[in-house]
Image (cartoon, rainbow, N blue to C red):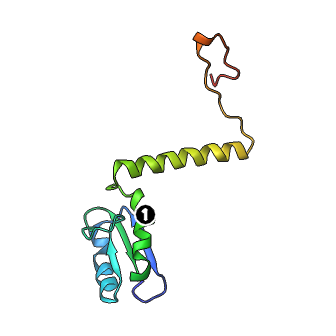
Amino acid sequence: MAAGFTDGFFETGLSPWDVAAGSLLVTEAGGLIGNFTGESDFLEQKECLAGAPRIYGQLVTILGKYSKFASAGDKAAVRTAVETLSRDRASDSGEPEAEVAADPADGTEPKDAPF
């Protein structure tokens, strides 16, 4: 990134010694570095996001909801999107979805119970 070959970088699970020297190179070259929510204390948080100033804010917007420091609402939105995507892929691939068991109070039988 510091050499200008890429405009952005992100990774999780890194130790401070994995990113300390690189973060100095990026900042000296004019780039920005932080965690996925844009906070500058990324060394101990095991989330690293670096980018050119023109796209850093866009990367934070995209990756912020995947941060372990994201708000509960952001994390719930990600879970909902993943569940919806999984259902859409299952219906596109022709796999039958398990139907919800019917309510015994209404007198109907479940059609294809998953068990």
User: The C terminus appears in which quarter of the rendering?
Assistant: top right
Badge 1 element? helix
Residue beneath disc 1: 63
Count neighbours of disc 1 (C-alpha within 10 A) and say few if under 14, some if 14 to 19, many if 20 or more: some
Residue found 28% across the figure and 72% down from its top: 17
* Residue type, label 1: Leu
Residue 8 sits in quarter: bottom left
Q: Is residue 101 left or right of residue 41?
A: right
Residue found 33% across the figure and 52% down from its top: 71
Residue 111 sits in quarter: top right
Q: Residue furthest front?
A: 106
Q: Name the spot of residue 41 as percent of width and height, x first.
A: 24, 68
53 up-or-down from 66: above or below: below
Q: Name the spot of residue 49 as percent of width and height, x first.
A: 38, 71
Residue found 32% across the figure and 68% down from its top: 38
User: The N terminus appears in which quarter of the rendering?
Assistant: bottom left
Q: Name the spot of residue 99 as percent of width and height, x first.
A: 65, 27
Residue found 25% across the figure and 64% down from its top: 44
Q: Name the spot of residue 2 as percent of width and height, x first.
A: 39, 86
